[in-house]
Amino acid sequence: MNLAVSPRADLFRLLGDESRLRLLALCAEEELTVGELAALLAESQPQVTKKSQPLREAGLLSSRRDGTRTLLRAQLIRDAVVDAALSEGRALCTRDGSLARIASIVAQREEASRRYFDERATHADGESMAAAGGELLAWLPVFAPLLPGRALAIDVGTGDGALLPLLSPLYDRVVAIDRSPGSLARCAARVAAWGLPNLRLREGGVEDAGVAEDIGQRGGADLVLMARVLRHAARPQDAIAAAARLLRPGGHLIVVDHLPHDDESVREQGVVWLGFEPAKLGAWIEAHLEPIALASLPGAARPALQIAVGKKPARHLH
């Protein structure tokens, strides 16, 4: 149904169902998977798919695929009837509590990732991470001329610390943060074996207030590195925004993550997203930083990798 040409009665009928009103309101708040919507609405996934179809046909909902998952987001138009329907849907979702539960439902995206990294303790996994880090070691020095600051670097989601031997010689101080105590314990053992003297390990995430306060007291970071981190983030755009806030004026953010792919097997590693469209990754960075580079990384890594670099503008002098 095309709202531009359909009779107003069709629009009233479409939006006269409370379930569709709730669905529209939830998708206006956050892009959600069919499974997440099913949990919020206490319905089955087939029911959600069926009820969303008329809204998709009307152009009020858009859908996209991430592997085998389907995500829905509201595509709202300037229309008094749609505005009233959205207001009523929000009221319904406020009364039944589903609107307030969105944050916790979205946060659950990272639970599999947390379990994976806490439970992963075999030697083979450590070797695998080191090999993955080695792929990046070959390319990150290419960007060294773009990164003039050498005081403080932050390795977000450091894992086993595979990239720390690169960062340690280049920076006076390196802070490696990770949410997994198990990963940090393994990282500490490797740092001790490598004899890297200027490293500090910290448990936490890039969005933690304590991390921001700590880095702010140091004047901000010259470099924030997020290598294969966004694929585990519940809301990658929020992680990028938080990373940008950690930078000092003139500091750089480097993001390395996968291009879109359909390898569902990586879900076993706690992966939330099967890669990112370069345009979307670039837009997330450009919302907070001056874009410097966005390119695919050549090499044997599968799924294929891409790198994005952004710079925090220097303060203007008045």
Image (cartoon, rainbow, N blue to C red):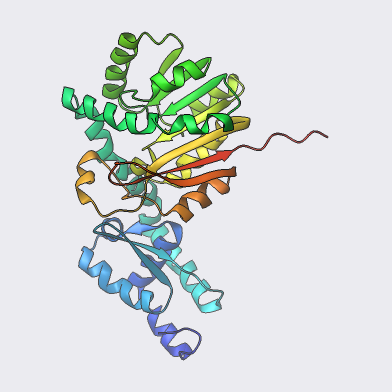
For the question of whether residue 122 can be seen, the reply is: no
Q: Quadrant of residue 292?
A: top right
Q: Quadrant of residue 111?
A: top left
Most extreme residue toward the right is 318
* Residue 80, above or below 91: below
* Residue 56, above or below 70: below
Which residue appears at 23% of the width and 51% of the height?
263
Which residue appears at 37% of the width and 27% of the height?
158
- Where does the image place residue 227, in percent across and percent down from the top left? 39, 35
Q: Is residue 318 left or right of residue 76?
A: right
Quadrant where the C terminus is found in the figure: top right
Q: Is residue 302 left or right of residue 124?
A: right
- Where does the image place residue 91, in percent across and percent down from the top left? 45, 63
Q: Nearer the viewer, residue 256 or 41?
A: 256
Q: Quadrant of residue 58?
A: bottom left
Q: Is residue 296 left or right of residue 69?
A: right
* Residue 159, above or below 2: above
* Residue 264, above or below 75: above
Which residue appears at 35% of the width and 72% of the height?
20
Q: Nearer the viewer, residue 295 or 121?
A: 295
- Where does the image place residue 314, in percent across and percent down from the top left? 69, 34
Q: Nearer the viewer, residue 307 or 311?
A: 307
Q: Nearer the viewer, residue 146 or 80?
A: 146
Which residue appears at 53% of the width and 14% of the height?
172
